[in-house]
Image: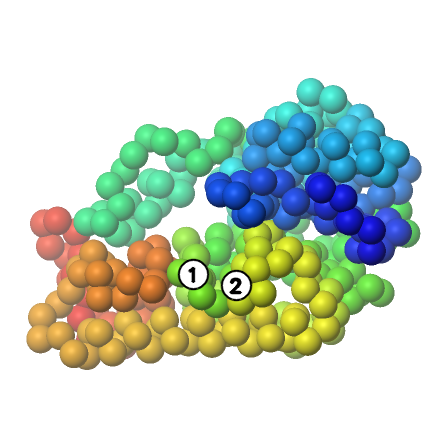
Amino acid sequence: MKKSDYGYKITDDVSFIKCPFSRPGYFTGVCAIFDETITLVDSGLAKSPEEAIFPYLKSVGRRPDEISKVVLTHGHGDHCDGVYTINKFSKVEVAVHKRDVPLINDPLLQARDLHRRFPGFFPFKAEPNHKPLDADILLEDGDRISVGKRELKVIHTPGHTAGSIVLLEEDLRLCICGDSIQGRGEGRPLLFYSSKEYEESVKKLIAEKIEVMVLGHPMPPFKKGVLYGEEVKTHLSESLKAIDELKAKVLEVLRSSDEALSLKELSQKIPEGRPSSIGCVLESLKASGEVERIEVSEGFLWKLK
C-alpha cells in the first residue's frame, strides 16, 4: 500500500484520496476506480480536484480528462462541489440516489427543511450549502454499477440524508460509505434526515460481509479514512451504540423535566449531541408515540407522552 501526500492505493485499481477540508488534518475522502477511464466516488469541495484529486492522478500516471463518472454518496457540498472543477477538464456523468436529487438541485433545501422542522432553533438563512447540480443517473437500492472489472452494489443507507448510499464491491468486501456510518465521539452521529432510518442503515451494514471500509471523513473512534478487519466491526458497533445512547439521553432529559422543552434547551442539556441529530431523535420518538410535540409561537416544544 504505497502512500503519497494525496492518497494511496487500496488495490491496484482502487485508490483513496484525501481532500483537505475544514481544519488541518481533516479531510473528505474520495475513491478513484481505474479502468480505461476513471470513476470517482464523491468529488470533494470545489477546490479538491486541483488541490488533491488531480495531483494524485498525476502521481499514478493518469490525467483529469480521463474521469468519466462521479458517483455521489450523498448531496452535500463537501462531496459534490468538486464536479464543477472536474467538468472544466472532462465532462462527467453524475450518479446519485433519487432521494438526494432535490438536495443537489437546490443548495438551500437543507436549510429550509431544518427551519421547517425546527423553526425555533434553525432560522432560515439563504447561505447555499453547495452549487446547484443536475444528475445524469438516478440510483436505487440494489442497483449495480459496472466499473471496468469491478461491480459496485448500491445500498441505500438513509439517515445523514434521505438519499445517502454506500457502494459495496462484494469480491473485495470493500464498502465505500461516504457519511452514511458516522462512528462515535466528537458529536457523532451528525444526522439531518432520520435517526430511526440511520439506526436501520447501520444494522443493514452489520449484516454485510465487509473487510475494508472507506469513510467520507476521519470519523471517530479511529479517525482514519480507511478501516480494515476488526476496525470495520468496531466502527459499525460503535456507530450503533452512539445512536442508542443519544436516544436514551434525550429520553432521560425529557423524563427529568417537569416542563416541555425546546430543541435549544435539549441541546444545552446534551452538549455532546448535534442539534440536528437530537431533532431527528425527537421526530423518531414522536413517530413511535413516546414523545409529544407541542406547537408554540416560537416553534415547537417536546415532552414525554
Q: Is residue 234 left or right of residue 153?
A: left
Out of 272 and 88, give the one closest to the viewer: 272
Q: Does the residue at mark 2 contact the one at mark 1 (Cβ under 8 Å)?
A: yes
Q: Secondary structure at mark 2?
A: loop
Residue 265: x and y in percent read: 18, 61
Q: Which residue is mark 2?
A: 220
Crowding near the residue tagged with mark 2, few <14, some 14–19, many ≥20 C-alpha atoms within 10 Å = some
Q: Earlier in the sequence, mark 2 or mark 1?
A: 1
Dot 1 falls on a residue whose secondary structure is: loop
| Residue drawn 58% across the image and 30% down it | 46
Q: Which residue is mark 1?
A: 186
Query: Quarter-wise, where is residue 233 in the image?
Result: bottom right
Image vertical order of residue 67 relative to residue 79, above or below: above
On the image, the x and y values in percent for residue 17 come to 70, 45
Q: Residues within 10 Å of mark 1 (few under 14, many from 20)?
A: few
Q: Quadrant of residue 228?
A: bottom right
User: At label 2, which amino acid type do we have?
Assistant: Pro
Q: Position of residue 120 (x, y in %)?
A: 19, 49
Q: Residue at x 47, y 76 (%)?
A: 241
Task: Tell me how far mark 2 sits from mark 1, CA to CA.
Answer: 7 Å
Q: Viewed as shown, does residue 172 lie left or right of 158?
A: right
User: What residue occupies the far top of the structure in this picture?
Assistant: 88
Residue at position x 36%, y 31% from top? 127
Q: Give the amino acid type for the residue marked by disc 1 in the picture.
A: Glu
Which residue is found at the position 20% from the left and 56% from the top? 264
Viewer can see residue 68: no
Q: Considering only vertical position in the picture, is 280 above or below 242?
A: above
Residue 176, visible in the rendered structure: yes
